[in-house]
């Protein structure tokens, strides 16, 4: 990757999904509906990520062995919001993200439809993915993801607490981004907080993300 610059990077949009590549993966509820109605819903989605990234199953009633995809794909950052989600992923194998997202999204839709007695699709088509090929876009997108909630410092369903040092989630890999800050958490916290009021660039980024491509 090229070194950081002062200019806001543009996402690299492509229909080919390569190994050894970072991607910003995102989706929302069909017709912009709410996909996380309460704490349990958020916890189930995160639990599915944990199961497929680590192979660990915390459900004592169901001891099903889950595929361990953590050697093929890493989760660097995430944020779950009531109507949408954002994931920052790195894949070392070409189809790793596809396998992870297919399992997580299918499992969540089955859970959601069963819990709320509904049928049909829950998400707005296939998830979108923007590839990231520049350092400044990599850490910028992590900041964008963490700033999604207004109360981002206390929002419980994002990876912010791992970057601020409050938590250490084993199936979340913060090192690639923190290396850009020499491992200094205070520098990263300032990097995020300095951007809280920068609405112009944030809105431009949202527009760019709306033109992302699908992972199939």
Image (cartoon, rainbow, N blue to C red):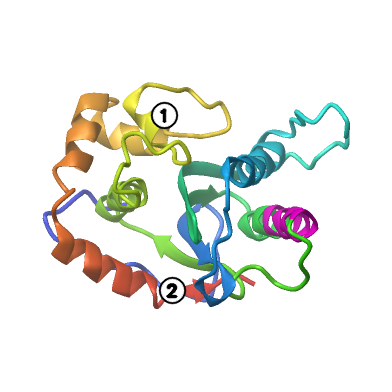
Q: Secondary structure at mark 1?
A: helix
Q: Is residue 1 left or right of residue 75?
A: left
> Which residue corresponds to the image point at 39% horizontal and 21% vertical from the top-left?
166
Circle 2 crowding by C-alpha within 10 Å: few under 14, some 14–19, many from 20: many
- Residue 197 lies, with reference to residue 129, above or below; the image says above
Q: Is residue 128 left or right of residue 165?
A: right
Camera-nearest residue between 121 and 78 = 121
Q: Nearer the viewer, mark 1 or mark 2?
A: 1
Magenta span dominant secondary structure: helix
Q: Where residue 149 sits in the image (x, y, percent)?
A: 34, 49
Q: Which residues are magenta?
A: 104-115
- Residue 179 lies, with reference to residue 8, above or below; the image says above
Circle 1 crowding by C-alpha within 10 Å: few under 14, some 14–19, many from 20: some
Of the numbered discs 1 and 2, the one sitting upstream in the chain is 1
Q: Is residue 185 left or right of residue 211?
A: left
Residue 162: numbered disc? 1
> Which residue corresponds to the image point at 79% horizontal and 62% vertical from the top-left?
117
Q: Where residue 196 sits in the image (x, y, percent)?
A: 18, 48
Q: Where residue 71 sits in the image (x, y, percent)?
A: 65, 39
- Location of the C terminus by quadrant is bottom right
- Residue 168 lies, with reference to residue 195, above or below; the image says above
> Which residue corresponds to the image point at 49% horizontal and 75% vertical from the top-left?
213
Mark 2 lies on residue: 212
Q: CA distance from mark 1 to mark 2?
A: 27 Å
Inspect this view and state whether residue 8 appears.
Answer: no
Camera-nearest residue between 122 and 198 = 122
Inspect this view and state whether residue 197 appears.
Answer: yes
Residue 14: numbered disc? none
- Decide: marks 1, 2 in contact (CB < 8 A)? no
């Amino acid at each position: 990757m090229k070194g950081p610059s002062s200019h806001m990077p543009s996402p690299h949009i492509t229909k080919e999904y390569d190994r050894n590549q970072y991607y910003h993966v995102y989706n929302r509820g069909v017709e912009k509906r709410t996909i996380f109605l309460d704490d349990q819903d958020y916890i189930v989605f995160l639990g599915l990520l944990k199961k497929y990234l680590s192979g660990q199953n915390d459900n004592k009633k169901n001891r099903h062995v889950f595929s361990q995809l953590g050697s093929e794909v890493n989760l660097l950052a995430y944020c779950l919001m009531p109507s949408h989600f954002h994931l920052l992923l790195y894949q070392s194998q070409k189809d790793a993200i596809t396998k992870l997202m297919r399992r997580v999204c299918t499992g969540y839709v089955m859970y959601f439809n069963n819990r709320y007695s509904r049928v049909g699709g829950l998400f707005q088509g296939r998830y979108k993915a923007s590839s990231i090929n520049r350092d400044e876009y990599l850490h910028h997108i992590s900041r964008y993801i963490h700033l999604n909630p207004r109360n981002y410092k206390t929002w419980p369903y994002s990876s912010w607490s791992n970057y601020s040092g409050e938590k250490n989630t084993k199936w979340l890999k913060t090192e690639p981004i923190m290396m850009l800050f020499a491992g200094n958490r205070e520098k990263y916290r300032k990097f995020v907080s300095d951007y809280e009021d920068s609405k112009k660039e944030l809105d431009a980024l949202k527009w760019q993300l709306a033109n992302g491509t699908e992972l199939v």
